[in-house]
Structures are given as C-alpha cells and as structure tokens.
C-alpha cells in the first residue's frame, strides 16, 4: 500500500513543528508521506494525539503551534507516538515582550443586532429569569424547594416571557473569615448573579446565623431591587420565618408577586456591542487547539469588532502561553497584571505542594494532551487575535470593551461561575471529550472539537467544529459560531437549556481555609 500524504491523516499546524496531530486513528504500519520522506507509524496514534515527523533527541524541544509544549524525555523516532511516556513539561524562559505585537482595533464591517433585554440601567440581557439566591449552603434546599414549586406546577405557563425561576445555590457561606478574602469574593460572586443582565428580579434566602449574612452582601455590594425602587432586596431567613415550610411559602408568594412585572418585559432590537461573551473549554483533547478553540477565537474577534466584549478565564490553562497574551496587551500595566496572576498561581499551588502541570486531567491526556503548555497554547486560541485590554479578578464586573482575561481556576464550573458573575450574558464552551456543562442564567453554546463526539452526543452539542479536520476552514466554523451566538442571544435555546442543565453548576471559588 503506497504512503498516504500527511495532510490526509493529520494536521501539521506550523512548518517548524516537529509533530503533527492525528485527524483520525492511525494504525501501526501506516506509511505517511511528509516533505518527500516516508515515515511509518510504529504504534497506534489516537485521534487528537501527536505523531513525530522527524527524529527528536532526548532533551530537545517538542513544538506545536510553533511553540514549546515540552521536552523529549527520551529519543523519539519519526512515526512514533508522542505523549506522556516520552514527553515532559520541563521549564523554559518566556519572553513577555509587553505590547510588542498589540494589534490595531479590528474593522467592524456590517453592524449586527440581536433581540435582547434593555434593562434601562446599562445592563443588556439575553434571558429573562427570576433568581432565588441562597446566601449559605444551609438554605440551598429551601431555595430549590421554592424554584421547584414553579417548575412542577402551572404557575409559569401564565408568564411566557419569563425564562424560569432559578435557584442559585452553593456549598459555602459559612466557616470562613468574616469580611476576609473568601467572604468578599463570595459576596462579589453572588452579587454578580443578582445584578446579572439576564436576571430581571431576585430574592435572597438565608438560614439566619451564617457568616455570610445577607446584610453584609447587600451593603458590601450595593444590592437593590431591580425594579427601580432603590429599596433593598427581599431577604427571607429560615430561622426568622419559622422553618423550611414557612420560608418556602413566603418565597413562593414573593416570586408570584414578581412574575407579572417580569413577564411585561419584552425583547427589543439591540446592537451586538451589548454582547459580553464568556468562553471556556472543558473535557479538552488534542484537537481542541486545532478546531473548536481557534474557531471560537474567530467568533471572539467578530464580537470585539462589533464593539462587544470577549472573556477568557482559566489562568492555570493560560500558564506557559501567557507570553503570547502579554505581547497583545494594550499597555505594559495590563500585561504585568497577567504576569502577577501567573506568579500568584505558582505560589498558590506551591503552598499545597501541587504542580500546575498536574493539569491536564486524566481525560485530557486520554484525548491527546500531554503537558500544561500544550493545553494552554490551545486554550488561549479561544481569545482570538485582538488586543488584550484588561485583566480582572475573579467575578469582578467586566466594564471594558474588547478582549479581557479573568483570573479563574481551570475547573470548569468554578471558572464559568466567575465569568458569568462578571457579566457574561452568553457563553460558548468547547469540548473534545464531551462536557455537558450549562450555567443558568447564561445560555451556553457547546462546540465539539471532533465529528465522532458530535455524532455520539448530538443531544448535547450545538456546533461541530470537527469539520475543520475534514477540510472546512476554521474561519467558516468561527462565523457559524458567531451567527449562533446572535441566534441564542435572541432567544434560541441551546442544547443544555433544552436538557434543563445549568442550576447545579453554580460553583463559587473558595480560595482559603474552611474554618
């Protein structure tokens, strides 16, 4: 059997790369033609995994995307599978070159629009929810019982313009330093959901004796009712109401009073500069940085070109690729903010005796990702190519227009919780292994990195970026994602919304000790 061209079985991303990424499963004995030479696959190389194209000596850099993803831990022959058995992370110096490659603002082209909600106070939504926000884990079940009353009865059917009554519950709210870093970060996160543009009204539900008192949240974050009254929001506490049952009844009455007002709010035509896109990748594989993430980067650039905002998080999955973002920073100060976060993460993981290279996860490695550098280089592709205009703390309100970084952990629910709390009114989540993530009140579009996954989990995936491996240009898939963003922002349901996913995934980041 004659040797097949490399382009038919793998993706060679940059001329300087000494590996290629398998576009399908490559079986032992397959002969591949590359640069006038034939190489033989000596062991099975799975979809998304790496194939050596040239001899790589022990200690030599392995390049993907034209960047270092690690160093050979042994001699590697052409045609050999490159993975954890022969590739390690190692350490290398990065040239941050602050602002050196900062691009000019992108050209907008034709102004685009979506049908959304103008809250009249500078907030613009894509959904119309009522939220029940639990101040502490002790009131989580009670908050859910209130929301379930509306889910299991016909109450909501009378209000077609209300997307739902969602319970925002979590596992924290107590056993933390009063007014300390965790307390204030939890307040900021809960307030981000209370003030969220996709939330038209909300109530707070607490136990009564927790550290995370509702009054601290209200005063610390300036919470008011969202109906223009400037009054403090309604707070129900189980201990004051007289138990769970009485609190649930009071909550149901309060929500029932809010429903007619929320239902009166209608969608209106809004320009695309009102979009705040939250991006994330989870259950990644070796093709995440080849197909879905670059395509999402194209959509991110299109949002920014319209005057909107695009957020990338997961700082631990920027690690090793941060030097590519600092070069795009609009100022040295912005670039330095990112490096300060990187150094904080080195300190933070070191305190617990952990290594950032413990990420990629088991599933990531099965999908072909070997080192954190490789994962990060693919992950930052979600941020497109526009200038980095700001670096924000976890759940910090996003006020800048353009491409921004938010400091979040790599754990998907925790990361997206912070991004949504910061103001993202629509999300796009890429996956190669099959994440089924959703995050109410923010609709979340799911993009698969490969066609087998899309076909296998068609009820959970919205877009198939795997067609890139079959010859479709990345730019075309990126435009498809952009168009879906506009459709979903206008009310089209995502697969995760149709499945009812998104309430349990609220997961604020706890950074300190549990006391």
Image (cartoon, rainbow, N blue to C red):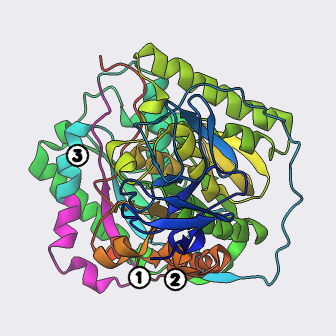
382 left or right of 183? right
Observer able to see residue 368: yes
User: Residue 185 at x, y = what percent?
Assistant: 48, 33
Nearest the camera: 423 or 452?
A: 452
157 is higher (above) or lower (below) than 188: below
Disc 1 to disc 2: CB gap under 8 Å: yes
Tell me what residue is drawn at x 62 percent, y 82 percent. 114
Disc 2 to disc 3: CB gap under 8 Å: no
Mark 1 burial class by Cα count in 10 Å: few <14, some 14-19, many 20+: some
Q: Secondary structure at mark 2?
A: loop
Counting residues from the start of the chain, the first of labels 1 and 2 encountered is 1
Counting residues from the start of the chain, the first of labels 2 and 3 encountered is 3
Nearest the camera: 341 or 6?
A: 6
User: Residue 493 at x, y = what percent?
Assistant: 41, 80
Nearest the camera: 80 or 85?
A: 80
The magenta span reads 146-174
Q: Is residue 512 magenta?
A: no
Q: Secondary structure at mark 3?
A: helix
Query: For the residues marked 1 and 2, what is the alpha-carbon distance in whole angstroms?
Result: 7 Å
| Label 3 sits on residue | 140
Nearest the camera: 153 or 466?
A: 466
User: Residue 357 at x, y = what percent?
Assistant: 47, 31
Q: Is residue 151 magenta?
A: yes
| Labels 2, 3: front one | 3
225 is higher (above) or lower (below) than 260: above
| Label 1 sits on residue | 161
Q: Residue furthest front?
A: 1
Residue 266 numbered tag: 2
């Amino acid at each position: 059997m004659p040797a097949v061209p490399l382009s038919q079985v793998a993706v060679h991303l940059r001329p300087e790369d000494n590996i290629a990424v398998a576009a399908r499963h490559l079986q032992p004995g397959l002969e591949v033609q590359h640069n006038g030479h034939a190489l033989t696959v000596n062991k099975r190389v799975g979809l998304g995994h790496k194939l050596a194209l040239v001899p790589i000596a022990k200690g030599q850099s392995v390049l993907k995307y034209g960047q270092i993803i690690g160093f050979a831990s042994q001699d590697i022959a052409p045609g050999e599978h490159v993975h954890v058995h022969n590739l390690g992370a190692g350490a290398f110096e990065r040239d941050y070159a602050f602002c050196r490659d900062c691009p000019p603002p992108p050209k907008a082209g034709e102004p685009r629009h979506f049908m959304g909600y103008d809250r009249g106070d500078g907030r613009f939504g894509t959904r119309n929810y009522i939220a029940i926000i639990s101040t502490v884990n002790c009131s989580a079940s009670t908050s859910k019982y209130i929301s379930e009353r509306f889910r299991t009865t016909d109450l909501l059917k009378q209000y077609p313009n209300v997307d739902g009554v969602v319970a925002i519950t979590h596992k924290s709210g107590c056993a933390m330093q009063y007014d300390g870093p965790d307390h204030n970060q939890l307040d900021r996160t809960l307030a981000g959901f209370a003030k969220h543009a996709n939330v038209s009204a909300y109530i707070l539900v607490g136990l009564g004796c927790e550290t995370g008192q509702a009054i601290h949240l209200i005063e610390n974050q300036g919470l008011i009712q969202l109906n223009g009254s400037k009054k403090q929001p309604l707070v129900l506490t189980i201990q004051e109401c007289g138990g769970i049952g009485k609190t649930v009844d009071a909550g149901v009455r309060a929500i029932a009073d809010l429903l007619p007002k929320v239902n009166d709010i209608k969608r209106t035509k809004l320009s695309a500069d009102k979009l705040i896109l939250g991006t994330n990748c989870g259950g990644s594989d070796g093709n995440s940085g080849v197909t879905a993430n670059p395509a999402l980067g194209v959509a991110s650039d299109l949002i920014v070109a319209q005057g909107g905002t695009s957020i990338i998080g997961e700082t631990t999955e920027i690690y090793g690729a941060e030097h590519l973002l600092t070069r795009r920073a609009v100022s040295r100060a912005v670039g330095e903010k990112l490096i300060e976060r990187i150094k904080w993460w080195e300190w933070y993981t070191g305190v617990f005796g952990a290594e950032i290279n413990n990420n990629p996860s088991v599933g990531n490695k099965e999908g072909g990702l070997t080192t954190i550098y490789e994962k990060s280089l693919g992950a930052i592709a979600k941020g497109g190519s526009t200038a980095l205009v700001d670096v924000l703390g976890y759940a910090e309100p996003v006020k800048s227009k353009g491409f921004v970084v938010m400091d979040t952990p790599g754990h998907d629910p925790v990361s997206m919780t912070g991004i949504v709390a910061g103001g993202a009114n629509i999300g796009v989540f890429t996956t190669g292994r099959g994440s089924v993530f959703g995050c109410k009140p923010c609709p979340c579009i799911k993009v698969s990195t490969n066609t087998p996954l899309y076909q296998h989990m068609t009820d959970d995936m919205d877009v198939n970026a795997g067609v890139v491996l079959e010859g479709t240009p990345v730019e075309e898939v990126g435009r498809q994602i952009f168009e879906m963003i506009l459709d979903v922002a206008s009310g089209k349901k995502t697969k995760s919304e149709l499945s009812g996913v998104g309430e349990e995934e609220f997961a604020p980041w706890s950074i300190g000790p549990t006391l």
